[in-house]
Image (tube, grey):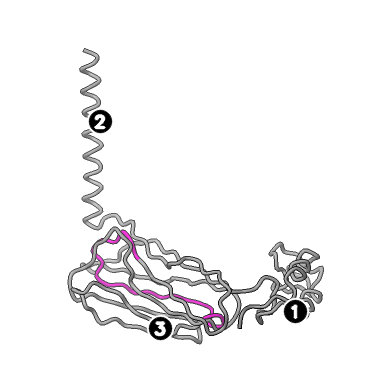
Amino acid sequence: MKKGLVITLTSILTLTLMTSIAIVSVVRLAGGVSSAKLYVEPSSICEALSLGQRFFINITVIDIINMYSYDIKLGYDAEVLNVVGVAAMFPEENLPTPNFDVDNVIGLVWINVTYDGEPVTTDVPLTLGIIEFKVQGYGETLLNLYDTKIVDSEGDLITHDVEGGFFNNALEGDINNDGIVDIFDLVIAAAAFGSYPGHPRWNPIADINNDGLIDIFDLVIIGVNFGKSLPL
């Protein structure tokens, strides 16, 4: 009797779980729930890239349902990077005419695409755009995705997570970002030595280890890297 009761309860629980999973799947397919994610890949580029060198990033989406159009903005520091090429990627059956805009003064690239054919549903990574950058200077910058919009075939916005990227080709200790750790970096740090946020001599670029105080530890970093330079 008890054994039969256990079997019955187990069957009920299993059936309930399967029903719940089916309901969640139907809701997702109906567009009620979205786990879509829009991101930059690679997410981090920390290489000793010199002036004039080029590299690519992808703007990728995953777990998207019924995507019919997208509008993407990506910001960057134009003193460090410039955009020299943009390409939109899409299935052959859609063949839309993409819209682009690049502003290397403020550091902005814009991509806008509306599909001509069927909307896209995919649970694997799909590249929406490829951006080619040229290194303009030394330093670091966010590759910041913002004001992104993904729209379904009904004209409704698709909620999605967004993850930008990061670029850094700076040489540790190179405070003035001229590609070499030398006496000029030491002079900058020495002029701000002992200062902290709010102090009249505070210079945040000299706080190399980001501990809120310009002290001997920052000078040591310069000393260890003194004479090092990035490739021309």
Secondary structure found at label 1: loop
Using the rendered view, name the quadrant where residue 18 is placed. Answer: top left
Which residue does the numbered mark 1 point to in the structure image? 182
Give the residue type at disc 2: Leu
Place of residue 11 in the rendered image (x, y in percent of width and height, measured from the top left)? 21, 28
Left/right of residue 232 with respect to residue 199 in the rendered view: left
Which residue does the numbered mark 2 point to in the structure image? 13
Left/right of residue 75 with respect to residue 222 in the rendered view: left
Q: Residue at x 50, y 87 (%)?
A: 105
Which residue does the numbered mark 3 point to in the structure image? 85
Q: Earlier in the sequence, mark 1 or mark 2?
A: 2
Place of residue 46 in the rendered image (x, y in percent of width and height, measured from the top left)? 55, 69
Using the rendered view, name the quadrant where residue 199 is placed. Answer: bottom right
Which label was assigned to residue 99? none
Q: Earlier in the sequence, mark 1 or mark 3?
A: 3
- Viewer-side label of 1, 3: 1
Q: Residue at x 23, y 72 (%)?
A: 91
Secondary structure found at label 3: strand
Quadrant of the drawing holding the N terminus: top left
Q: Residue at x 41, y 64 (%)?
A: 162
User: Residues in magenta?
Assistant: 61-81
Neighbour tally class for label 2: few under 14, some 14-19, many 20 plus, Cα within 10 Å: few
How many marks overall? 3
Place of residue 32 in the rendered image (x, y in percent of width and height, measured from the top left)? 26, 55
Left/right of residue 201 with respect to residue 73 in the rendered view: right
Q: Are marks 1 and 3 in contact (CB under 8 Å)?
A: no
Neighbour tally class for label 1: few under 14, some 14-19, many 20 plus, Cα within 10 Å: many
Considering the whole magenta stretch, tell me its main secondary structure.
Answer: strand
Q: Earlier in the sequence, mark 3 or mark 2?
A: 2
